[in-house]
Every structure is written in C-alpha cells, then in structure tokens.
Image (tube, grey):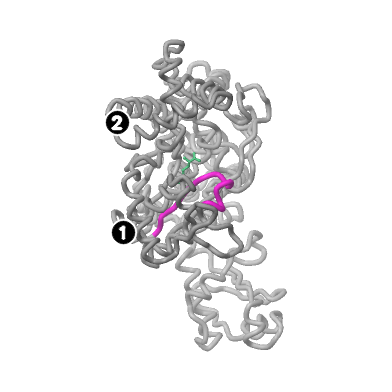
Amino acid sequence: MEELKKIVASSIGIALSNEMDCNEILDKIEVPKDKINGDFAYPCFHLAKIMRNSPANIASELKEKITLANNIKRVEAVNGYLNFYMDNANLTSETLAKIMNEKEMYGSSDIGNGQNIVIDYSSPNIAKPFHLGHFRNTVLGSAMYRLYQELGYHMIGINYLGDWGRQFGLLIEGYNRYKEEYDIEKDPLNALSDIYVRINTLAKEDETVMDAAREQFKRLEQGDTELLKKWEYFREISLKEYNRIYEILGCHFDSYNGEAFYNDKMEEVIDILIKKNVLIDSQGAKVVEVGNNMPPCIVLKSNGSTIYATRDLAAILYRARTYDFTKAIYVTGSEQILHFRQVFEVAKNLVDEKYQKGLVHIPYGMIRLKTGKMSTREGNIVYINDLINDAIYKSKAIIVQKNAQIENVEKLAKQVGVGALVFNYLKSNKLKDIIFDLDETLRFDGETGPYVQYTYVRIRSLLEKANFDENNKEIKFEQLANEAEINLIKELAQFETIILKAANEYEPSILTRYIIDIATLFSRFYNECQVLNCEDENLKLARCALSYCTGIVIKKGLAILGIECPDRM
Ligand code: ARG
C-alpha cells in the first residue's frame, strides 16, 4: 500500500511539474473511508492560494495531467479532491504474498533506525494504591513503547516512581506511630496509604506533628541511614505490588529511577539556570519566566526546597546525556499539561535544541466508573487487583458457559479478561474520559477485546479444518476479486501505515480501531464467501490464505497493544 501511495504521489508531483516536494504530497494523500471515492484521495485545497485558482478547478486540471500507468487505473476530480482508483489485482497478490512471506514481521519497519526513544510511563507514587488513572497510563505507555519498537526504535522505558518529597517525612512519622496496628506485608499499599491519610489529618490539627515530619524528611534528605532503610522498605514493598500488575500487563521498564534518584542532581540545574541568568526572585521563591501566557515555573520554593518540577528538569538533563534520545515521551493525566509545558520551556536552558524539541507530553483523560460498586474510597481510587480479578472471574464464567469442556481455562480467562480491559482502555481517543463498565467491556460481540480475539480463534479453527499450509507458494491470489475480499485486503495492506500513524499521533486507539475494522471486514467476507465449502479448490485455497493473513494482522496488532491471542475460546 505504501508503494502504491508513493506511485500516486509521484504522479501528482509530475502533474504539478515537480514544483512540490514529493514527501509533502505524500503527507497530504488520504485513504477515503468509502471506497467509492477511490483508493487514495489528494485534497487540492492547500493549492488554491499558491495556484490562484479554486480547488475544484485545480483538481480538474490535474486530472488531465495524470498518466494512467503503474497501477493507476482511473482518476476522478470530485469537489476539490483528486480521487485515485488503483489496479486491485496487483494490490491483492502483492499484499497477501507479502504477509505470507513476512508472517509475524509484517507491518514492522526500520524507520527508527535504532535511534533511542525514552518513554516515562506508569510512574505511580509509592506507598499509594495503583488507581484507574495509573492503569490507563500504564496501558497507554506500554502500547506506545511497542508501537515505536515496531518502527525500529530502541526504546527505554522508565518508571519514574514518585518516591521523594515531604510526604515521606509524614509517612515515616505515621509509620513509627501506627505500624503495630497494621499487617503491612499483607496489603502494603492500602496499609501505607491509610497510615498516610491518618498522619496527614493529625498533622493538620497538631503543628508539632508537622514539625516532626519535617524533621524526618530533612534527616532523610541528609542521608540518615536508618530513615533511608525505612524509605527503601516502602519503595520495595510498593514495587513488589506494582510488579504484579506489570507482569499481568506484560509491560517492560528499563529503569525505575524515580524522583529520589535526582536528589543529588538538582544542584547542577540550579547552577546552570543561575549562570544563564534566568532564575529570578519572585515573592521569595526562585522562578523562571516561561512566557506564552503561562505562570512562571517555580524551581525553588521560598524555603529553599526543590519541587516536582526541579526534579523533572534534572531528569531531562540526565536523560539527554545518558540516552542521547530523539524523543523523550511522558505519559501522565491531563492535569499535568501545564507542568510539562513549563518544564519543557525551562529545559531550553539546559539541553541542546535537538533534545528540547524531542520532549513530548502525552496527556490522557479521566476514568470514571459506571457503578460505584468497586470499592471507591476517594473518588476514583479503585483497587486494580480487584478489577483485574473481577475481569478474569467473569470471563471464566462466560467461557465455561460457552464450552464446559474447554482446556486451560485459567490461562484463557486471564487472556480474555485482561485483554478485554486493555482493549477497552485503548479503544477511545486518549484524551477522552472513559466511563468504565466491566460487563460491556467483556462482551463477546461489539467493539470489544473478546470479539476480536474470538475472530482470531475462528480463523485458526477454520484453517485447521482446511488443513491449510502456511508455506504454500502456489496460491492464486488473483482469484480473490469480490468486493468483500478486496475491501479486507485493502485494509490489511494498511497495517504498516496504521502503525506509523498511531505512533506519530501518540494514539494507540488508531490501531485498536483498525483491528476492529479488520475483524468486521473479515466477518463480512466470511458471511458472503464460502471458504470451507468452496467448490473451486484454487479459490478455496486463496480464501484460506486471506483468512490466514487476517489472523496474522489481528494477532500482531493485538500484541502491539499488549493483548494476547488465545488459540481457542
Ligand atoms: N508520579 C506522577 C503521578 O503519579 C507522574 C510522574 C510522571 N513523570 C514525570 N517525569 N513527571 O502523577
């Protein structure tokens, strides 16, 4: 498909007498949703100003200049668009032969050329439960990690743990007072967060408690061994809990350097900002003006202490030096948009332009529950473990109801339950708020994870029944000419473009929706065309090959999103 697109771009380039850069043309070419409008469309609106003519006239004039060759069968000018109709016979055999040949490698590319991309994601605050927001963060970051990996980038996943700050003074103080009342090892995150809430309330009433907490944090900052041990303990038991979730989600981190890691790296940042003369006094605090109608970025508070932003600045400097990144991506909730805009602006003073330009913040929307049932304590704090267990438990019931004899039901229920959650989170645009409804998420029909997994399973069983040989080189793909077949093939041909688009737009939902489209097109094809009962052996073989290729794309697409495909269900 990419090849065909390039052919179209170059034919437009020639028609424009090579006055326009071919890559620019390529960027503008669209794939019409409705195939009636052709396989590709080139909007002429941006040319109106340059060519001093209406888009409709420009399209008609260009149409006359396009040569019909090289797979271009027909061109039409419609409402300022130039629509291209391609020769499908070639597309069909090229696409399917490519998939059969490349198998699991289909869709991958090496555009990234091994360049480094840092992705800071998940990054929960230790000693606190993992809530729905962090779950969305983790799933989103993990999908971005794999999307870029598919494009040939070298990925560095960083879990920037929230493991530093004044609150640890309070936590230590609370722990000393209340630890006997809890079985901390049993449920560390809830115990610690409970302790924190209690001591925080107390400190608000009693100034001496706050003083004691301040003293604890000061000693911790100065490296008091006993306190450091406690802090390490909090970090360790928290990570152990988080790792359980990471393992279930199959996500990967190359570093767990959190905020604490930057404790001794902020001084250099302050020095640089002073030397550059950008650190100014503002009501006792030290700030950097960032313009663009934003409030200044506070780097040191009036009592001289560093803050979240100071550590993020140190992290930018460190990551540029350590990883020499092309991009450094940050995934967090949208409430941190201003924070990152400010920090990225200040970073201009710290790192080379090429690094500063590579800083990207990916914000995401909120998650709300449809039912308040799932133990909400404070707004959206939901026990993720409960949610995952619920999803697995319910999937198991559905699977067993469908087939009581099914083997490996535990593993299967996990694949389906967890897959359904992940799929649901990655289905909508990242900025959109999600109203979460577990039963809806687990449905076997509609736009759900189980539905696409089930499509894959159907394909596998079909191929088994047909005894399909995936290494057969004698398949006559040109037999596939009916509309349902062609539409599916055209969509399969888009895989590489979709991966690129989803990565470039930091929007895994583009891939999720694509997989839904593939599953839907497959169902249509399967309803309209006989496969197993097809009398013509050559056609049957070609249809099996098409099914096989669909299976490859679904399985790989889901794997990029972080979802496993069961063999049976
Ligand atoms: N710990 C923060 C939170 O839970 C997210 C950290 C994001 N990463 C960063 N480099 N600031 O909201």
Eyeballing the image, is 536 above or below 161? Answer: below
Q: Is residue 53 visible?
A: yes
The residue sitting at 37% across, 49% down in the picture is: 103
Relative placement, left or right, of 398 versus 546 is: right
Relative placement, left or right, of 320 versus 513 is: left
Report the front residue among 369 and 113. 369
Task: Give me the C-alpha separation between circle 2 and circle 1.
Answer: 34 Å
* Residue stretch in magenta: 327-339
Q: Residues within 10 Å of mark 1 (few under 14, many from 20)?
A: some
Residue on which disc 1 sits: 324
Relative placement, left or right, of 161 versus 27 is: left
Q: Residues within 10 Å of mark 2 (few under 14, many from 20)?
A: few
User: From the Cβ of disc 1, is ligand 1 less than 8 Å away?
Assistant: no
The residue sitting at 54% across, 82% down in the picture is: 67
Q: Dot 2: what SS?
A: loop
Report the front residue among 242 and 285. 285
Q: Amino acid at mark 2?
A: Asp
Q: Position of residue 99 (x, y in %)?
A: 41, 53
Q: Amino acid at mark 1?
A: Asp
The residue sitting at 51% across, 35% down in the picture is: 135
Please state the total of marks drawn on the protein image: 2
Report the front residue among 482 and 239. 239
Q: Dot 1: what SS?
A: loop
Mark 2 or mark 1: name the one nearer the start of the chain: 2
Which residue appears farthest toward the top when viewing the image?
A: 181
Q: Position of residue 556 (x, y in %)?
A: 43, 45
Report the front residue among 312 and 536. 312
Q: Is residue 552 visible?
A: no
Residue on which disc 2 sits: 224
Q: Position of residue 493 (x, y in %)?
A: 49, 57
Whether 337 is among the magenta residues is yes
Residue 264, label in figure: none
